[in-house]
Image (cartoon, rainbow, N blue to C red):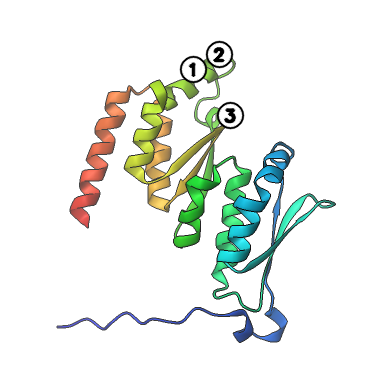
Amino acid sequence: MELPRKPTFQPIQPNNVSDSAELQFCFVPVPPNRRKPLQKAWKTQIYEPIRNEMKIDIRMNLVAKRVELKTMINTPDISNLYKCSSYVQAFMLCFEPEQVREAFFRYDNLDMSSLDIQDVKRTLKGDHLIRAIGRICGKSGKIKFMIENATKTRIVFAGNKIHFVGTHDGIKIAKDCVCRVIMGSPAAKIASRLRTITARASERF
């Protein structure tokens, strides 16, 4: 028995929406520690890709200290607004634009999530907290890169918080591995767990 084919729908364009919702807006607040990096990266890494590639209007509101995005008449897909706002939010979370720009602009199922190290283990303070971050990174970033490559995610450390970008399942696995490292699991066990997960995923697909 042949299954019915999956229906395909054309993306909704702004001029096809009702007049009351013709233009869609989105605002991304700019934290104080990201204002200077935003100023340096504004033209080449923020404004030009969003305006020229995604056809989304963007400006920096200096009074409200936020980035404002808006669809235009020639925006090919309204979902571009969500992709661009997610890209700007990732920049505010200290992700490098080169790491996440193509992923956010090309794929639809990317998520962002954050984890506070002290929510995993409240006794970590001072040097103990620094050592915990060092264990997650590993020598020359070995453990961090291993988790990123196995789960297809990107990880950034910002003080006590760890930010993740990737698919929902990938972020879930990456968070689990990071929590295990914080609680004291050795790198060998994390590597073995990641090999098992990737092997199961390859068998499934």
Can residue 194 be seen? yes
Residue at 17% across / 83% down in the picture? 2
The residue closer to the viewer here, 51 or 187, is 51
Per the model, the C-alpha gap separating discs 1 and 3 is: 12 Å
> Farthest top residue?
127
> Farthest left residue?
1
Amino acid carrying label 2: it is Asp
Residue at 27% across / 24% down in the picture? 188
The residue closer to the viewer here, 203 or 104, is 104
- Indicate which disc residue 131 carries: 1
Label 3 Cα crowd, 10 Å radius (few <14 / some 14-19 / many 20+): some
Amino acid carrying label 3: it is Asn
Q: Is residue 43 above or below residue 134?
A: below
- Indicate which disc residue 202 carries: none
Residue 193 found in image quarter = top left
Residues at badges 1 and 2 in contact (C-beta under 8 Å)? yes
The kind of secondary structure element at disc 2 is: helix
User: Can you identify the residue that label 2 sits on?
Assistant: 127
Q: Is residue 3 left or right of residue 6?
A: left
Residue at 72% across / 39% down in the picture? 36
Residue 35: x, y in percent? Answer: 73, 42
User: Can you identify the residue that label 3 sits on?
Assistant: 160
Can residue 183 be seen? no
Quarter occupied by the N terminus: bottom left
